[in-house]
Image (cartoon, rainbow, N blue to C red):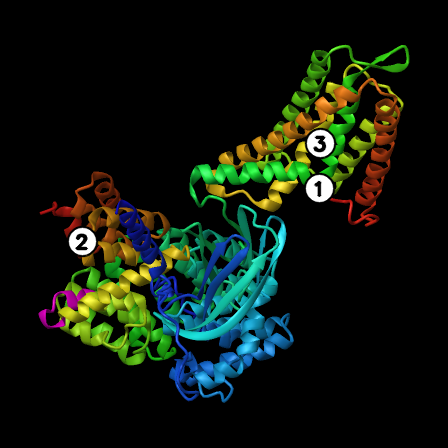
Amino acid sequence: MKRLIPMLLCVALASPAWAHKASDAYLTVERDGVNISGRWDIALRDLDLALGLDANGDGQLTWGEVRARQDAIAALAMARLALSSGGEKCAMRADGMQIDAHTDGAYAVLALSGSCVHAGPTVTVEYSLLFDVDPQHRGLLNYVDEGESRSAVFSADRTRQVVGGDTGGPLAQFAAYVHEGVWHIWLGFDHILFLVSLLLPAVLVRRDGAWKAAASFQDAFWDVARIVTAFTLAHSITLTLAALGIVSLPSRWVESAIALSVVLAALNNIFPVVARGRWIAAFAFGLLHGFGFAGALADLGLPAGSLALSLAGFNVGVELGQLAIVAAFLPLAFALRSTWAYRRVVLAGGSAVIVAIAGVWLVERAFDLPLFVALAAG
Amino acid sequence: MRRDWKWMAVAIVTAVAINGGALAAPYTPADDGIVLERLPEALDPALAELKRMRAALRANPNDLDHAARLARRCIEAARETGDPRFLGQAQAALAPWWAAADPPPPALLLRATVKQSQHDFSGALADLDRLLAVRAGDGQALLTRATILTVLGRYADAQRDCAKLVRLASGLVTTTCLAGASSLNGDAAGAYRGLVQALARAGDTAGTRAWALTLAAEIAARRGEAGAADIHFREALALDPRDAYLVAAYADFLLGQARAREAASLLADSAKNDALLLRLALAERSLPDKRSEFADHRRELADRFAAARRRGDTVHLREEARFRLDVENDIPAALVLAKANWNVQREPADLRILAAAARASGENDARRTVTDWLASTRLEDVAVVALAERRAP
């Protein structure tokens, strides 16, 4: 008979299970535009667990032992922290190491600094310190922006969090997302080219197999209004559905389909199939473009506390950016509509160029081949 | 001027929020020889072995035997020292099997043990059910499951598991397992008698005997037999003076007997363990010459609870409820915590804090929960009965 020597449980004692203190590290990140500064307090005991700091094995960590491993400590920490803003990584580095006393012992304090390429409204923080040696470790983030602080907790199950975007009050936050929306449509050439492809024929009328100048500005204006409204409505619907996580499509599929939509819209100007109901095409393809906007918004990050406000701001920004394009395009196109150059060079030639560019995107995105990296601004 | 006030408010809120991390001014030590930290192995050289085992496992992380040995040592270290970092290290040793749907039995047992320490009782029970389905005669698994079922108040299920230990473990282990459940379910006298008889026979390890003696002491204390309880507690402490659970139980007994000075001297070196620090503060509260120690420990506890809250821990609801009620006199917060705790675990201590919070607040729901539980389980606990009978002063 095997004699059982019981392993007694912490459950029977339930409470002392949390005695001393579980492993926490304290990360403070302060942002000022594209610049990041901060500090990171990591328990020496935890660093000893991960790196083995006790060189002489006497169970004590001296400043000499810790200081000798400063580079290893900084390398460990920086490999386990990534910040990004506006979908671009921020360059981060540890500038120096000091010591601070916490309730459960001495901590190494790393001074952090860095800069982001793009000052998006939020910062995405990826944190994976110590989870391999102590899965119950927590990273406690204190994020400071616009004089306000937000906290977040990282755990082995939650290594990525989006912070900020809800600092600076609702108005500032709304404005930040409007700004991002405007920039996204202006920098997202695929959306512009799609819109332009649909708008180019708006100052013309298809009659007897040939393009004729539209008789009045009013006709042209309403044609444009129909197209823009349909496009807007459609992509607002899918942007919202995707941002709220109700519908999700693979991004490669979406980006390829968007490129295809641009090819088809431009081809239709050269070999017209759909003349009158272009707003229907605008609506149908607009649904696709909404998923594309959602991808960009996901890169920016939405603050969980005020999702609706940021989403509305981004949507408004996209519309404003779009209206600005239309406002610049329509008077110019209307003025030139009767010229040979508009019909031949702008409409036919321009559409052919658009077909070519969008065709390249289509191949790149569908087959994941970087042909024209510079053009693939999506 | 208004603006200044606003900033001051922000500064205060921020300072309070950060306080859990106790961010002070970092400094550069003046000399390389300055000792910054004493590692656990400095206090207990046996813990240095954990480091060697961990290094060996790193070379071959999928070695189940080695991983299980390390995890078990970590769990024991957590129990002995009350240091939760060891539980995280146990989990790390089990990493290859932690998320697996069907890990081998040794990994399942240890995974369940770590899960229950995080108060994931349903996860722990699921692992143990799976393990016992393939190894019905795993004594440790049966004992672990019985312990969890007892904590959850499922005494009949617990007793069924304990009964299966008869052929797997010593008489004392089986008797203690059974007594743990039956003493809370209407048969405290029989459970106590059985324990005393089983203890009369020699054998078993000091750890097992200390465990049985602790239970005997607790049953006697619940039945109002203070003299017997005191003797058993002392016998147990003689065998295992460092066991944090035992020290906490004896301290609670002494506090209940208005022997605060003895409790304070018992706990004098236990400030690192939060559960023991709470008892120490409770003892010092009633000792006029310990007023400044009490103030320090009260602040320290508040900091530790705030720190635990910041990291999202909920494993110490019982202690926090007691802290709010008995140290801070914050009755509404204590009631909320005591009720939340009662939804997770149902040991006599959980009922006691619920009864105390119910009495202090005069809340009828909580009072009824206590009286219903007493009626349905026939729990014999003089302290709870007194709290349930007396109306708030």
- Above or below, A195 against B74 in this view is above
**Magenta span covers which residues?**
B282-290
Residue at numbered disc 1: A251
Name the chain letter of the residue that bears numbered label 2: B
The image quadrant that residue A253 belongs to is: top right
Residue at numbered disc 3: A288
Residue drawn at x 59%, y 45% as measured from the top left: A300
- Above or below, A339 against A359 in this view is above
Give the SS element for disc 2. Answer: loop
A32 left or right of B220?
right
Location of residue B327 in the rendering, given as x and y in whole percent from the top left corner: 19, 59
Name the chain letter of the residue that bears numbered label 1: A
For this rendering, which residue is in front, A90 or B177?
A90
B343 left or right of A25?
left
Dot 1 or dot 3: first in sequence order is 1
Residue at numbered disc 2: B329
